[in-house]
Amino acid sequence: MKRAKGTTTPPITSTHTTQGSELGFNFELFAHCTSFFGEKVVLLGNFNGEGLGEENKDFKVLVRCKPGVEFIRVLVKNHRMVGATLIGDVDLAETFENLLMNQINIASIEDELLREDVDLEDYFD
């Protein structure tokens, strides 16, 4: 079965329609979910900051860490979220995905974005 999928998937994903455009779907946002040492890991957008420039000059890094519970790292450029790493029991992945895809200006709440007492799910979903 793997062999059949491996031989048919590349031609299918590279096929163009009769109008010459790509297939009927586009990937708007990089997102990857996995488990590492038993912890849920979610990587969104430009989670590693590659190509963003110099940290604290061209982009800002926001971090919330509760050892053994959660780790959240958000990359912000021009008051818009450009990437995020979420590890552990974190329910913010969908909210962060919406912020990334919609390129919402978060300047007004940027400093409070990762505070635990701020309910981002209700604010942005």
Image (cartoon, rainbow, N blue to C red):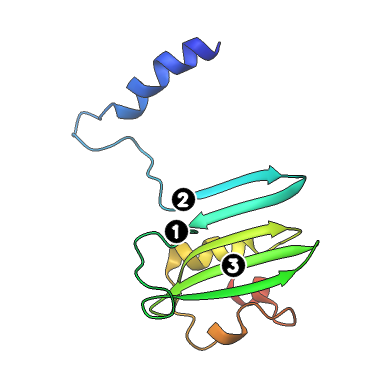
The local secondary structure at tag 2 comes to: loop
Which numbered circle lies on residue 73? 3
The local secondary structure at tag 3 comes to: strand
Q: Mark 3 and mark 1: span between their CA atoms?
A: 11 Å
Of labels 2 and 1, earlier in sequence is 2
Of labels 3 and 2, earlier in sequence is 2
Expressed as whole percent of the image width and height from the top left, the position of residue 33 reads: 61, 46
Determine the residue positioned at 75% across, 82% down.
Answer: 117
The local secondary structure at tag 1 comes to: loop
Query: Number of numbered discs present?
Result: 3
Expressed as whole percent of the image width and height from the top left, the position of residue 81 reads: 47, 70
Question: 51 left or right of 49?
Answer: left
Which numbered circle lies on residue 32? none
Q: Mark 3 and mark 2: span between their CA atoms?
A: 16 Å
Q: Pointer 2: what residue?
A: 30
| Mark 2 and mark 1 residues within 8 Å of each other at the beta carbon | yes
Mark 1 belongs to which amino acid?
A: Asn
Expressed as whole percent of the image width and height from the top left, the position of residue 10 reads: 36, 23
Single out the residue that lies furthest toward the bottom.
108
| Mark 3 and mark 1 residues within 8 Å of each other at the beta carbon | no
Q: Mark 2 and mark 1: span between their CA atoms?
A: 8 Å
Characterize the local packing of mark 1: few (<14), some (14-19) or many (20 or more) Cα atoms within 10 angstroms.
many
Mark 2 belongs to which amino acid?
A: Phe
**29 relative to 69, above or below:** above
Of labels 3 and 1, earlier in sequence is 1
Characterize the local packing of mark 2: few (<14), some (14-19) or many (20 or more) Cα atoms within 10 angstroms.
some
Question: 97 left or right of 118?
Answer: left
Q: Pointer 1: what residue?
A: 46
